[in-house]
Image (tube, grey):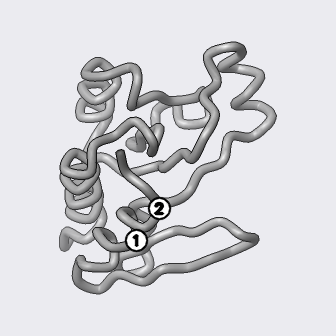
Amino acid sequence: MATWDDVHRIATSMPDVTERVREGVVDWRVKDKLFVWERPLRKTDLSALGAAAPSGPILAARVPDLGAKEALLASDHSVYFTTPHFHGYPAILVRLEHIEVGELEELIVEAWHARARRR
């Protein structure tokens, strides 16, 4: 299963990526646009998720659009989830210890593309 070392290795292999640590939380940006980040669950998340709240490391990743988010949510409930905080926002939450490294790489590359594209 995937680790933060895998996230770091994959994210920093992409062009124009910077890694930032703020208040002990790590995020990765392309051209100063957030594309993947560590996302500890907050009190409101824990309250909303109740007994279904996962333990362990949580990664957040941008996705191209809400359709992609819904597809990931439907694909594997043991890996992907969301909270009310992310309602209407193109990002997905990932149980890092439950995702295979190859799938993590696909997710991070897609997140990078979603944020790095030229307008």
Quadrant position of the C terminus in the picture:
bottom left
Q: Nearer the viewer, residue 85 or 36?
A: 36
Across and down, in percent, residue 54 comes to 60, 28
Across and down, in percent, residue 21 comes to 62, 77
In the rendered structure, are the residues bearing label 2 and label 1 in contact, judged by CB atoms less than 8 Å apart? yes
Q: Is residue 117 above or below residue 46?
A: below
Q: Is residue 86 above or below residue 5?
A: above
Q: Residue at x 25, y 30 (%)?
A: 67
Q: How many marks?
A: 2
Q: Is residue 97 above or below residue 44?
A: below
Q: Is residue 38 above or below residue 97?
A: below
38 lies left or right of 13: right
Across and down, in percent, residue 26 comes to 57, 69
Quarter of the rendering containing residue 49: top right
What's the amino acid at mark 2? Trp
* Secondary structure beneath label 2: helix
14 lies left or right of 41: left
What's the amino acid at mark 1? His
87 lies left or right of 6: right
Quadrant position of the N terminus in the picture:
top left
Q: Dot 2 corresponds to which residue?
A: 4
Across and down, in percent, residue 22 comes to 68, 74
Number of other residues with Cα within 10 Å of mark 2, as a class: few under 14, some 14 to 19, many 20 or more? some
Residue 8 numbered tag: 1
Q: Residue at x 24, y 25 (%)?
A: 71
Q: Residue at x 35, y 81 (%)?
A: 17
